[in-house]
Amino acid sequence: MIPNTKSNAPASIMTRRLCLRAPVLEDAFAIDPIYNDFEVARWVNVPHPCPTGFALERFQRFLTFPPHERCFILSKKSDRKQKAIGLILANWMDTEKPPIVGFFLESKFHGKGFMNEALDAAFEEIFRLTDADAIRASHYLGNVASEKLLAKKGFEPVGTSNDFNRTTGKTEEQIDLILPRAVFEGA
């Protein structure tokens, strides 16, 4: 059964160029080709090639709007159809740890400042929704774009971990980072 996403969807957030909005089922069809772009999938940890239905299956979970999770679909504000060009996912189910975020953007929009703009709005919302003192993120060693972006946002490295990457089929080292609330609010 498909949940009624219209009645309980979180409000959209507008930035200068973007709309961060709640997902709708149709977004799975826009996200699927992004998952199948190796340059994105390599760092996102999705199967590659991504099987048909993978995005659709994930989106069915996003449409339930769990109280401990927020999925932000990124679309250009100027796009009347609001086609998904990326995603930010935040989860704070583990109350012993700060919320964790992950994100990706369609490769043709890389290097244009869209994710920088989107993360500012998403982090503000995550801190508003939680009483967390920090936000966590990780990136695979070698993901220079995410490394630079997270450093620019004020994230501080706190260690490393290993994670099995479904795209490469290997266990890879990740850099684990924390963004203290005070650093974000002081920026």
Image (tube, rainbow, N blue to C red):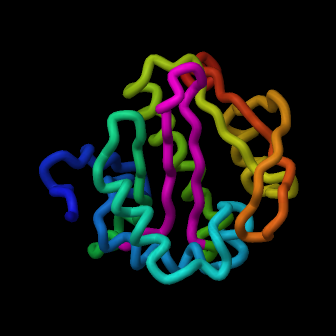
Figure check: 42 above or below 133: below
Residue 67 in percent (x, y) is at 33, 35
Q: Residue 34 appears in which quarter of the rendering?
A: bottom right
Q: Is residue 80 left or right of residue 160?
A: left
Q: Residue 83 appears in which quarter of the rendering?
A: bottom left
Q: Residue 81 appears in which quarter of the rendering?
A: bottom left
Q: Specify the quadrant that holds the C terminus.
A: top right
Which residue sits furthest left? 7
Residue 49 in percent (x, y) is at 65, 82
Give the number of marks: 0
Q: Specify the quadrant that holds the N terminus.
A: bottom left
Q: In this view, does 106 lie to the left or right of 178?
A: left
Query: As rendered, which of 1 and 173 lies closer to the eye?
Result: 1
Name the residue rendered at 73%, 68% in the picture: 42
Figure check: 138 above or below 125: below
Residue 64 in percent (x, y) is at 29, 50
Name the residue rendered at 50%, 64% in the picture: 86
| The residue stretch that appears in magenta | 83-106
Query: As rendered, which of 120 and 55 lies closer to the eye?
Result: 55
Specify whether residue 96 is painted magenta. Answer: yes
Q: In this view, does 176 lie to the left or right of 32?
A: right
